[in-house]
Image: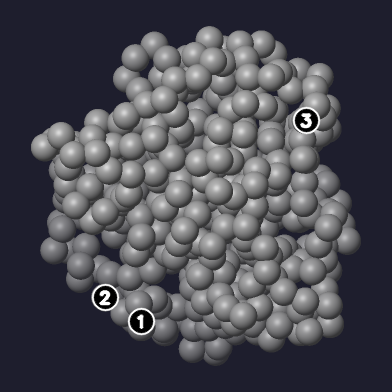
Amino acid sequence: MKMDVLLGLQWGDEGKGKVVDVLAPQYDVVARFQGGPNAGHTLEFDGIKHVLHQIPSGIFRSNLVNIIGNGVVLDPVVLRKEIQGLGKFNISFNENLFISKKATIIIPTHKLLDAAYEKSKGDKKIGSTLKGIGPTYQDKVGRVALRVGDILSPDFKSKYEGLVSKHKTILSFYDFPLDELDELEKVFFEAIEFFKTLNLIDSEYQVNEYLASNKRVLAEGAQGSLLDIDFGSYPFVTSSSTMAAGACTGLGVAPSKIGEVYGIFKAYCTRVGSGPFPTELFDADGEAMRKEGNEFGSTTGRPRRCGWIDLPALRYSIMINGVTQLFMMKADVLNIFEEIKICTHYQLPDGTTVDKLTYELGDLEVTPIYQTVKGWNTSLAGVTSYDGFPEELKAYVTLLEENLQVPIKLVSVGPDRIQTILR
């Protein structure tokens, strides 16, 4: 059995959590392979909205195993709150949640470093969520980080203090206050004791054993491909590999064991934080899009930047991930428009037209070239099948498929899990 991968193709917030929840009955295991509590996966069913930050989105399905892989950076405090918040749903965490001992731990001073680094950038901020993600990945690459397995060691406290000492030296350079550290540490160590009661495992063995025994595994990514540390809009990116390749390193699965790659995208584009966004709208259309789509960060609450769909960016993400199926989300947000624009190319300052995301584009002001199509301009409420779609929406889907050369197998027309149309 091969492992399928589900990931975002834009700048995150594409609706991955909802799709995992919808696909979950087809799988035995859902495994998160990267990111941290800066991710917010939103699921909605039975009239209730749920936002998950670190726990895989299959947690509401009682017969599924959920694994937090080694590529994830974990905040014990956030995880404890998340588990406690889900207590009313009678979820058996001891039976269906497993955490890699090789996952890296976010400690309190990582958050302080995050704030210090961001403050020092002035008006060149990258838009960090200030959750300590970047500094934690820095320590991981620098080979000084603490990992989940370390909390079981009798000398964990001394390891912790050694890392904090390094962090304090850096924070003193930035003249950053440590006033809140004592309280942060108190809550942190309480969470560590709770952490010890969970299933801490060598997850790479467990995932591969599941595959060997013909169990179906779905790898769940966080953020989006255009935020990938290597291939995203650097430096305005996250600190991990958000691509299909990241599922291999983030779970310990060989590339030859990757099966379907599900690429999720919105019927338009959004972005949180700083960085290039060629199709961003600053007019009434952009504001209407934000309001209609309730485009505010599920983790930070920050208003998302909104714009029309960007085909060069989508083709790029499809290429680097080897996407085999596309899922289009939030088609209903475009219900309000009589005309819809599709970015097909970019015009460079020298007048040249391109349809690729080359290295140089990160430093250039590009002008999107649009194709305008007729909108459906009607509600999609009550639509339960693709045949029930307005002809204009069908034409939009067909046009995207022709341009992207990958089939669109799912179209979401609302936030609830039942508002998901499979083709």
Display coloring: one colour
Query: Left or right of 255: which side holds 385?
Result: right
- Decide which of 416, 88 is in the foreground and name it: 416
* Residue drawn at point x = 11 percent, y = 37 percent: 350
Tag 1 residue: 144
Q: Could you say which quadrant of the image residue 279 lies in?
A: top left
Q: Secondary structure at mark 1?
A: loop
Tag 2 residue: 166
What distance separates the C-alpha of mark 1 from that of mark 3?
52 Å
What distance separates the C-alpha of mark 2 from that of mark 1?
10 Å
Residue 167: image location, x then y, percent: 28, 70
Residue 79: image location, x then y, percent: 61, 58
Which amino acid, by three-letter code, is at mark 3?
A: Tyr
Q: Nearer the viewer, mark 3 or mark 2?
A: 3
Query: Left or right of 217: which side holds 404?
Result: left
Whether residue 272 is visible to the viewer of this picture, yes or no, is yes
Of callouts 3 and 2, which one flags the residue occurring earlier in the amino acid sequence?
A: 2
